[in-house]
Amino acid sequence: MSLSDWLLLLILSTFFGGAFFFVVIAVDEIPPLTLALCRCGIAAAVLLAYVWAKGQSLPSDFAVWRGLVILALLNTVLPFTLIFWGQQHIPSGLAAILNATAPLFSILLAHFATADEKLTTRRALGVAVGFVGVVIVIGIDALWAVGLNVLAQLAVVAAAFCYAATGVYGRRFQRFPSAVIAASVLLLGGLMLIPIAGLVDRPWQLPAPSLAAVASTIGLAVVSTAFAFLIFFRLLARTGATNLQLVAFLIPVSAILLGVGFLGEVLEWRHFAGMALIATGLAIIDGRPERLLRRALLQEA
């Protein structure tokens, strides 16, 4: 990876980590379903403009759109709603730590759903270490008395599972330009959320949100969704999927720094211990530390 690639990776992690920061500010005044609708709608508008500016077009096959409906549920409607609801009850940094478990679920789902990504001993060890970290983050004692705090954490973990399922299911759309699929998914997610948010939240009956909540919603949709997506796929093309997995290590760091620095959030020692184990599990799965150790040993020899 070049210096510019590392810089883009840091920017991407800040944008993704900033999503948790924006949500904390917005969700106090905008209910989760309505916030998810706004995120999808605004981000879809930005990406549709980008797609059309590039001379691309949306899929025309009905069968493709039928599959995209499932992808939209997995990638927008369910995870956005679960995370936004969860962040009403837990700090943004904690939500980001739990959301970092998505690659762990990806390994398990890919083993059962694909023919070329089977579970190896190294990957199984990484998943096991990562899930021990999840238990520590949530708290072993808390699991025996499930309250609102624990349910909120489990909701974020469920959202991470949805993101993992997105990665496996979304492989069937690889023949389409990435921006086209993202714009289509966000558009469908927004359309599905319109009646749901209308029935549940009745946003027209709520008081007008403050300027801070509106600005945070726009930041969430434009910066942490549309712009982040474009950087994500640019890096994917330049560095490959393996190097891009590094962003999973960096997102919780940026979210914690933003939450502690600007929102006055406080995390407990077990949250950091659990994050260290989740990061260790991801590192084992990635195999990067093992490769670096082998290189060092070869150089010494």
Image (cartoon, rainbow, N blue to C red):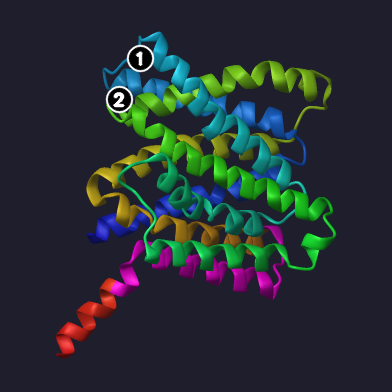
Q: Is residue 243 above or below residue 178?
A: below
Secondary structure type for disc 2: loop
Location of the C terminus by quadrant is bottom left
Q: Is residue 127 above or below residue 216?
A: below
Q: Which residues are magenta?
A: 263-290
- 275 displayed left or right of 26: left
The answer to whether residue 288 is magenta is yes
On the question of residue 66 being in view, the answer is yes
Residue 62 in picture, x, y percent from top left = 41, 9
Secondary structure type for disc 1: loop
Name the residue carrying label 2.
Answer: 176
Q: Are marks 2 and 1 in contact (CB under 8 Å)?
A: yes
- Residue pictured at 33% horizontal, 17% vertical: 52
Neighbours of disc 2 within 10 Å: few (<14), some (14-19), many (20+): few
Location of the N terminus by quadrant is bottom left
Q: Is residue 179 above or below residue 87?
A: above
- Residue pictured at 58% horizontal, 22% vertical: 190
Residue 103 in picture, x, y percent from top left = 46, 53
- 204 displayed left or right of 242: right
- Give the amino acid at mark 1: Pro
- Residue pictured at 45% horizontal, 54% vertical: 13
Majority SS type along the magenta span: helix
- Give the amino acid at mark 2: Phe
- Residue pictured at 27% horizontal, 22% vertical: 54
Name the residue carrying label 1.
Answer: 59
Label 2 and label 1: CA atoms lie apart by: 8 Å
Neighbours of disc 1 within 10 Å: few (<14), some (14-19), many (20+): some
On the question of residue 212 being in view, the answer is no
